Image: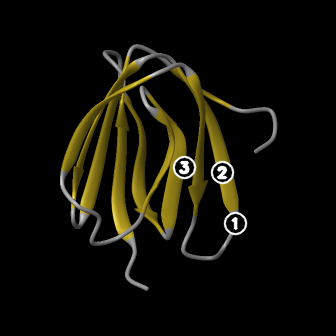
Amino acid sequence: MKPIDVRVVTPEKVFFEGKAAGITLRGSEGYLSVFYDHTPLVTSLLPGVLKIRTEDNEQKEAVLSQGFMEVKPEAVTIIVSSAETSANT
């Protein structure tokens, strides 16, 4: 499976930028997972945990505020007010 480019941006900085096997997070309609070649989508996000599965099959987590996500087949951009590294990472 090809990796998807993931970028998490806050007003202050680029919180995360890298490749992932996939991500899971909380959208306005419930939890969703995004992988390479996903159907294009723009959705609002609710506060919650972002789970990033790396290419090495490790899991990273971040706590996100509400925001928006744009999905393209090869990339995901997440724009939130704040993002913090989770204690579980």
In the image, which is nearer the foreground, mark 2 or mark 3?
3
Residue at the image position 41 percent from the left and 66 percent from the top: 35
Cα–Cα span, label 3 and label 1:
14 Å
Q: Element under label 1?
A: loop
Q: Quadrant of residue 42?
A: top left
Q: Position of residue 28 (x, y in %)?
A: 42, 26
Dot 2 surroundings within 10 Å: few (below 14), some, or many (20 or more)?
Answer: some
Residue at the image position 66 percent from the left and 43 percent from the top: 61
Query: Split into 4 quadrants, where in the image is the C terminus?
Result: top right
Q: Which circle's residue, 2 or 3, is located before the other in the chain?
A: 3
Dot 3 surroundings within 10 Å: few (below 14), some, or many (20 or more)?
Answer: some
Q: Amino acid at mark 2?
A: Lys
Whether label 2 touches label 3, CB < 8 Å: no
- 12 vs 75: above or below: above
Residue at the image position 31 percent from the left and 16 percent from the top: 11
Cα–Cα span, label 2 and label 1:
7 Å
Q: Amino acid at mark 1?
A: Glu
In the image, which is nearer the foreground, mark 3 or mark 1?
3
Q: Amino acid at mark 3?
A: Thr
Query: Split into 4 quadrants, where in the image is the N terminus?
Result: bottom left
- 35 vs 55: above or below: above
Dot 1 surroundings within 10 Å: few (below 14), some, or many (20 or more)?
Answer: few
Which residue is label 2 attached to?
60
Which residue is label 3 attached to?
24
Whether label 2 touches label 1, CB < 8 Å: yes
Which residue is label 1 attached to?
58
Q: Position of residue 9 (x, y in %)?
A: 34, 31
In the figure, is residue 42 to the left or right of 8? Answer: left
Q: Element under label 3?
A: strand
In the figure, is residue 48 to the left or right of 8? Answer: right
Number of residue marks: 3
